[in-house]
Amino acid sequence: MVRFPRGGKVKHPDEKVEIEVATMNLLREHTDIPIPEVKAWGVSSNNKLGIGPFIITSFVEGVNLGDVLQDHNDPDSRRMRPDISDANLETIYRQIVRFNLQISKLGFSHIGSLSATSQKGDDGCTAMIHARPMSWKMHETLNVGGVDVLGSLATTFSSVTDYFTQVADNDWQHLHEQLNSVDDEEDARQKYVYWSVFKALIPRFVTARYDKGPFKLVCDDFGPANMIVNNAQELRIVSVIDWEWSYAGPLQLFWSPPRWLLMQTPNTWSVSDERLEQYNRYLDIYLRILEEEEVVGCEEVFTDGRPSALMRQCRANGSMWFHHIIWEGFNGPTQVPFEQLRAAVPDFDDLIAAVPKQEVDAFVVTKMRDLEKYRRSLAQKKAWYQRLKEGR
């Protein structure tokens, strides 16, 4: 199978391909997770055909697990169909839990991405990290929002505090620089105070025990949509594909409740949506399986705490919702992650009240100017497009 980054959909395609290949090779070496073999790969500079970066992998026969699970009555939503049996969920979750337990054995001394030159570290880490973490959120902030928050190629992080602070600064930069990052005055006001509070909460939601590591391999694209099963009846996972957006990241992110349990991420749900209740029910199943599997041959790995205990703690103290905001871009105060985070923080409203009003007012004025500029530009582009269609 030959894969190319999609033009217009992927920024820094050479870097993306190199990270994905390095991640796949590392996992094939250190785990028995079914991952396609990389037969060949290249970046733009050494591609004689001029077709840009590419990956050639072995072909795996099967069906996409995401297609099996998707609600085909609502295909545009990428929502999980409601008639999946608990037995089938258990079959799927147990395999994924086993994959994650294997991945958790890999440790890194810094937060960042693997590269083609990554080698085993002298400090006992699985591999050296010397490139910036290219997360899905950072990439989409650039690709969709038009704001480059990726930073220097050589930027890595030695603490969770530094990384979370950078992510919050990226969100702050995105809010300020994307012309249409707000809908109206009230939206601008709410987003300013919520992002101010979010950054202030970082010290509370960093697990001090793991602030300096070890760091774990996080894949933002990991989930059923990138898994191949032998058939829709047995649901045996025969391949895990698309390891793009992988990086060494915080342990507390790695063992946070998965975002993909309903396939749709929580920032697409409405607050009163039944999906939140369904997600919690599926999480109960996932946690039970994790508790069962973590004691099978893995005693020596979890001296700092069992994964199920870490995940339950994330659920109990609300840090899972903080993590969802770290993971996902384009969040807003009315979406589930922020609503749930607000409910989990007793003094959230006090923190809102502490944001200086003059700062908020000044921001609102600036963003209303930005929004007007965006609307004028959009109207001009629409008029140009209409003239083009009419041949004028």
Image (cartoon, helix red, strand yellow):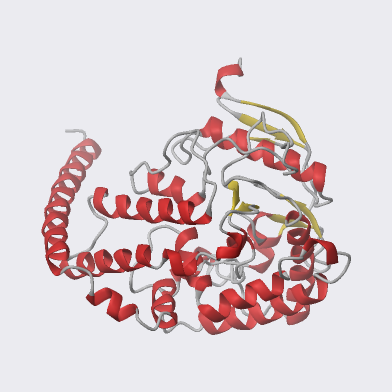
Residue at left offset 35%, top offset 65%: 200
Residue at 26% x, 68% y is 193
Horizontal and vertical percent position of residue 57: 74, 36
Provide residue 256's location: percent of width, then percent of height: 60, 67
Query: Is residue 43 rendered to the left or right of residue 271?
Result: right
Residue 351 higher or lower than 213, as above or below: below
Give the left or right position of residue 304, taking residue 352 as reference. right
- All told, the count of numbered labels is 0
| 246 vs 268: above or below | above
- What percent of the width, then of the height, locates residue 180? 24, 54
- Residue, x 48% and y 33% (percent of image)? 153
- Seen in the image, is 110 located left or right of residue 309? left
Q: Position of residue 259 (x, y in %)?
A: 57, 66
Quadrant of the drawing holding the C terminus: top left
Which quadrant of the figure has residue 18? Answer: top right
Q: Determine whether, in the image, residue 79 is placed left or right of residue 33.
A: left
Location of residue 380 with respect to 80 vertically, above or below: above
Assign the N terminus to one quadrant of the image: top right
Q: From the viewer's side, name the closer residue of 113 and 7.
A: 113
At horizontal 10% and vertical 59% (from top left) the residue drawn is 365
Query: Can the viewer see residue 334?
Result: yes
Tell me which corner region of the image, top left, top right, bottom left or bottom right, holds residue 102. Answer: bottom right
